[in-house]
Image (cartoon, rainbow, N blue to C red):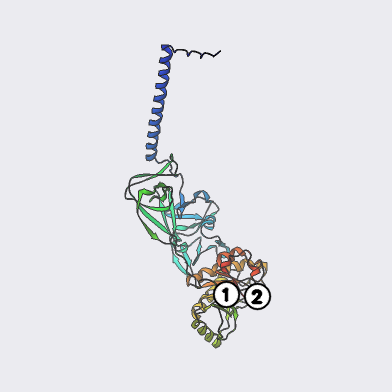
Amino acid sequence: MKKTKKAKKKMTKKEIERKKKKIIKRFFTIIIAIVVISIALIINDYIILDKNEKTNLVINNVNVTKDLKHDVFIEEDIIYLSKEDIQTQFDPYVYDEKENNQIITTYDKKIAVIGFENNEITINGSKKEIYAHAIKKDEIEYMPISEMKNVYNIEIENIEETKVVTIDFLDKEQKKAIVSSDLAVKDSKNLIAKTIARVKKGDSVIVVSSADDGFAKIRTQKGKIGYIKNDKLENAYNVRENLLQEKQIEGKVNLKWNSEINQLELPNVNAVAPLFFNIDSKGNLAENIGANGNAYIEWAHNQNYKIWPIISNNKISISNILDSYEKRQKLIEQIVTSCVKYRFDGVSINFESMTQEDKESFSRFLIELSPRLKEIGLVICVKITNQDGGDFDVSVLENVADYIVVNSENMLNGFDENRVIVIK
């Protein structure tokens, strides 16, 4: 026997009216939500919600404000960064020279000295007047970064309207483009994203990056970093390219170490390191070149060999003869003068029998010697004599030396193989 379907209950007129009202209410709710969202999106495009409460620091198109140990400090148009932040962002080896109450900093081809009293800075041995000096504020040391543009090879701008300080390295690539229409700059690529700035048609912006997803990351003229659509940029052009330091020798370096002072052909060799210099007990550079050495130098140049003469410490402890900035600078000036005089292409440092007390002085010597040599296009090689480089600060060697000289391939551990020269 088949089951009969249960008859559907017929809605009353009152129930039908109630259902209609629910449907109409839902419809208008959806419409209102759409309108509200649309208005919110439009308003969001015009209301800038990302206003800086304190000065932000942008270095090479990266906002590093959250990484700073201390706030950027601005006084009388001078921009200051704490010494700790200089150490993080620019020079890991910046240090206080207590004896003369000054700060020593190095960067690429520059070594600079700035004090806490006089408005002057010494860069690579030359003094220059500036508008500010280092200061101490709440026991924190600050350096006038806006007065040190030549040291760090940067351009710097204080944009008061948005409370942004921008710093750009002049050896780094920078690309700009023109905005094709008025736009909101967003803090992300999401559909709903906060507006951090607005740009107008014809504005020039820095192009930080562009991606296949249709978005470009830009930096506005007011220092804000955010996203717009790729197709809203036109007439892109390079302001500058990455400046790469040219190598004296492309490819593998074949170095003849402790070359004898004779004019014999050296197969496959492209650099020589004759023992021309010693450091005496007073920290002076003593040379051993003479007539034979001069003839050898001329011959080596004619053979297109690079000449990186050895500077030896004669196993003398250096903890006393290089324990101050003045002593190191005296020796460095002698090295630079000799390199220019004899047209050398670099130097090879071979300090032996060093103690733990020598380690710090030696590291500072390399850190301060390197920019002076780079300034005149010379390289610095450092020879290590044990497997782990225990006589030296390995991180300093990695960051400062152009080449690290070893006696065996077993001593390669921890070093960049492209910068290691194995001599036999």
Residue 314, image x and y in percent?
Answer: 64, 77
Query: What residue sits 51% from the left and 62% below the top?
Result: 115
Above or below, 378 relative to 78: below
Query: What residue sits 41% from the left and 29% below the top?
Result: 33
Q: Nearer the viewer, residue 98 or 220?
A: 220
Q: Nearer the viewer, residue 106 or 413?
A: 413
Question: In the rendered image, which quarter contains the C terminus?
Answer: bottom right
Around disc 1, counting alpha carbons within 10 Å, would you say few (fewer than 14), some (14 to 19), or many (20 or more)?
many
- The reply to whether residue 271 is in sight is yes
Disc 1 residue type? Ser
Q: Which numbered disc, 1 or 2, marks the residue that appears first in the sequence?
A: 2
Left or right of residue 422: residue 136: left
Task: Name the quadrant containing residue 335.
Answer: bottom right
Residue 323, image x and y in percent?
Answer: 61, 69
**On the image, numbered disc 2 is attached to which residue?**
316
**On the image, numbered disc 1 is attached to which residue?**
348
Q: What's the distance in space between the residues labelled 1 and 2, CA to CA?
A: 17 Å
Above or below, 6 relative to 320: above
